[in-house]
Image (cartoon, rainbow, N blue to C red):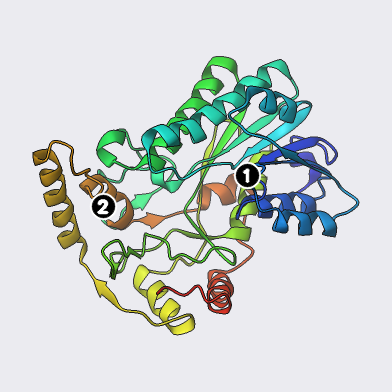
Amino acid sequence: MARSEFIIGFDDIILITGSSGFIGSRVVSTLLKYGFTNLRCFVRSSSNLASLNKIIKDYNNANIKIINGNLLSRDDCRNAIEGVSVIFHLAAVAEKSFAGSFMNNVLTTRNLLDATFQDKSLKRFLNVSSFAVYSNLNIKRGGMLDETCEVEKQLVERCEAYTFGKMKQDEMVMEYGRKYNTPYVIVRPGAVYGPGKSPITSRVGIDTFGIFMHLGGSNRIPLTYVDNCAEAMVLAGITKGVDGEVFNIVDDDLPTSREFLYLYKKNVKKFNTIYIPYSLFHFFCYLWEKYADWSKGQLQPVFNRRRCAAYWKGNQYTNQKMKEMLGWEPKVPTRDGLNRYFKFCKDNKNGHA
């Protein structure tokens, strides 16, 4: 993509929150590969900086600053965004409580957005959301889930703190765009995988009850290899003419859950699984909901039909919008990405027990 299609220059300041994380470190690396040389990497004091330090060493001619801070601190946010042209907001916490998710995903985002009011240099706020915010209750099994689809509105009934936090985060970013003309783009990655992240995505199945229950069956899994995902985020953050847009991030040639599990067992480690048909698990979730109601909240409806549908009902996915508006193509084919992921899991003895 030509420099003329970017909203910033190569020496403009870019802030990346969550920059030491699984995806964040790849975003930093991708920005440097594109030629951007003035990066601020916001990290917590407890962050593991091994990956980030290696990147900094490889690009010693770039101006890369590591900023230790807490996004719950308004002062830390103001100091971090001074003179910043683009913010890549990846920092997130998968809290188990609604209150914790609100504090660490929504309030932190608000603090960053508020800090931009005092510094007029911002040209784009890239907010990293998630596929988890979608509701597919009104989509038939096998139907297309894209950026136009409904998001989850029954957040309490969904009983998933992460979805609650991400949905409220998205709503806040959009509200700031409407009220204050904050220039934003939202990206929603599917199931991000690759070396450095060993757990099998829950869209394949779960082991909550002591045995791995394969729930995905013949569903396509919305995988995106971490390097492909990072490049999609970078392009969404710097490309002209896409303010206010939402982009889903998924790769091409998506495997079914059954194909993924077969390859995992073949290349990493064999382990016992039991296949549960969707209709059966959906009925189980219905019974769990009823018992939760009967117990008057003593048992939380963690298994419910809304969540069951969102993860295991089964949809088709598209990346056409990213390709057309961002010029993005997944550089790592799914077959290569899976091979790298399986090798990492096997080499690090992180195969599913």
Q: Which residue type carries mark 2? A: Cys
Residue 68 seen in the current view: yes
Q: Earlier in the sequence, mark 2 or mark 1?
A: 1
Categorize mark 2 by other alpha carbons within 10 Å: few (<14), some (14-19), many (20+). Answer: many
- For label 2, the SS is helix
**Residue 188 x/y as whole percent:** 50, 45
The number of discs equals: 2
- For label 1, the SS is loop
Q: Residue at x 45, y 38 (%)?
A: 166
Question: Residue lying farthest right?
Answer: 61
Tag on residue 18? 1
Q: Which residue type carries mark 1? A: Gly
Categorize mark 1 by other alpha carbons within 10 Å: few (<14), some (14-19), many (20+). Answer: many
Give above or below for 256 relative to 265: above
Residue bearing mark 2 = 308
**Residue 114 x/y as whole percent:** 61, 20
Q: Residue at x 43, y 47 (%)?
A: 131
**Residue 3 x/y as whole percent:** 80, 43
- Taking depth in this image into account, of 249 and 286 the one nearest to the observer is 286
Could you give the CA–CA distance between mark 2 and mark 1, rounded to whole angstroms?
29 Å
Quarter of the image for residue 124 reads top right
Q: Is residue 202 left or right of residue 343?
A: left
